[in-house]
Image (cartoon, rainbow, N blue to C red):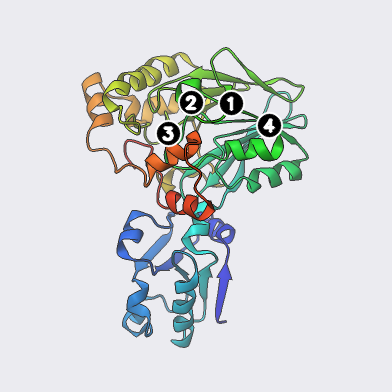
Amino acid sequence: MGMKLISAKEVTEKVLSNNALFILDVRNEDAFSDWKIEGKQVEHLNVPYFDLIDGVDEIVDKLPKNSEILVVCAKQGSSEMVGEHLVDAGFEDVFVLEGGMKTWSEYLNPVKIGDLKDGGSIYQFVRIGKGCLSYFIESNGEAIVVDSTRTIDAYIDFAKEKNVTIKHVLDTHLHADHISGGRLLQERTGATYYLPPKDAEEVQFSYEPLVEGKDISVGNTKVKAEPLYSPGHTIGSTSLVVDGQYLLTGDILFVESIGRPDLAGKAGDWADDLRNTLYDKYKQLSDELIVLPAHYGNASELGKNGQVHAKLGDLFEKNAGLNMDEKEFRRAVSENLPPQPNAYQEIRETNMGKITPNNDEQSEMEIGPNRCAIHG
């Protein structure tokens, strides 16, 4: 059968359907251990490309004989060379990830979360290669996009497909692990761009303040997005209660963890804010709200269609970050944290409009996993 290119979309479908997938990852060991394609039925072999330049004889006995092999590298070229060696060695089902891990990092998979009471729906865009989650809320011909990634064509194409106009774009906080597509969406669609003002004191552009008490409506059914000031991950972090059913938590609360308060160097100061938000403010909300976070950390958090969500009441029972005494909590959010996101200071400065890296530089800055939770 030879070697075939396979898209990030097709690989996502394989991962989400829990098909067994064998991956030969030919990036160097550091890149591989930092970040890889993950899934419940994914098996890896990591052998750097330089060890395979002359052929694959040394690893033949480590490869499955009668099943598909997916070869991945950073940008596609190296994996094609290795793929050809595999075909020459007699392997028949060889696939190469089109665009490599760069494309995997950027692919967005839209999945419907549910309906709104007066018509319309809410969708989650899952960036499976990075664990970022963004949202598209549409009703009566209008839409809001929340926590957009920089690959904004996905939202624009989706709006065309649904025949709706993107009217509002907002970020729940100033992101430190990925570059926001908020301003770009504003430029391309004419939408209003909202930011929490306490996170925007140094931004170099104009925006509408995202503040408690100033609801945002979409469509003539007045689906309300009600901002709820919820500091802790950042000083401006603001959650959204949408349609009285959904709680968009940004990077404050995840399904299996909680946000980290240290990405602006303020772990000590913000630990109390974070605890207050999670243990007091969120406690006053309905247990029935569906929590929709801005990230997930593990493939285990993905539902059967690839969506990430949970009832708030269930998280108060099961999420360890919501069940600690004060001392334990302070220790958890300030000690033994995972490494900070790659290039996070430059990402914050880009999101403030202080620096304007080109596309390749932005892609490079974002390579790697998200690290917005206190544990992965």
Disc 3 target residue = 254
> For this rendering, which residue is in front, 6 or 363?
363
| Corner quadrant of residue 281 | top left
Disc 4 target residue = 191
> For this rendering, which residue is in front, 228 or 116?
228
| Corner quadrant of residue 119 | top right
The span from disc 4 to disc 3 (Cα, nearest Å) is: 28 Å
Number of residues whose C-alpha sits closer than 10 Å to that of mark 1, classed few (under 14), some (14–19) or many (20 or more): some
Say whether disc 3 or disc 2 marks the residue closer to the N-terminus. 2
Looking at the picture, which amino acid does disc 2 mark?
Ala
Answer left or right for 326 relative to 216. Answer: left
The span from disc 3 to disc 2 (Cα, nearest Å) is: 23 Å
Front position among marks 1 and 4: 1
In the rendered structure, find residue 200 and report the number of the disc placed on it: 2
Which residue is rendered at x = 68% and y = 33% of the image? Answer: 121
- Please state the horizontal and vertical placement of residue 282, each as a whole percent of the image: 44, 19
Say whether disc 1 or disc 2 marks the residue closer to the N-terminus. 2
> For this rendering, which residue is in front, 86 or 28?
28
- Please state the horizontal and vertical placement of residue 327, each as a whole percent of the image: 21, 21
Q: Are dots 1 and 4 in contact, CB under 8 Å?
A: no
Front position among marks 3 and 2: 2
Looking at the picture, which amino acid does disc 4 mark?
Ala
Q: Point out the image quarter for the C terminus.
A: top left
Q: Are dots 1 and 2 in contact, CB under 8 Å?
A: yes
In the rendered structure, find residue 314 and report the number of the disc placed on it: none
Disc 1 target residue = 207
The span from disc 1 to disc 3 (Cα, nearest Å) is: 27 Å
The span from disc 1 to disc 2 (Cα, nearest Å) is: 9 Å
Which residue is rendered at x = 32% and y = 57% of the image? Answer: 33
Question: Judging from the image, what secondary structure is the residue with disc 3 in?
Answer: loop
- Please state the horizontal and vertical placement of residue 129, each as a whole percent of the image: 48, 52
Say whether disc 4 or disc 3 marks the residue closer to the N-terminus. 4
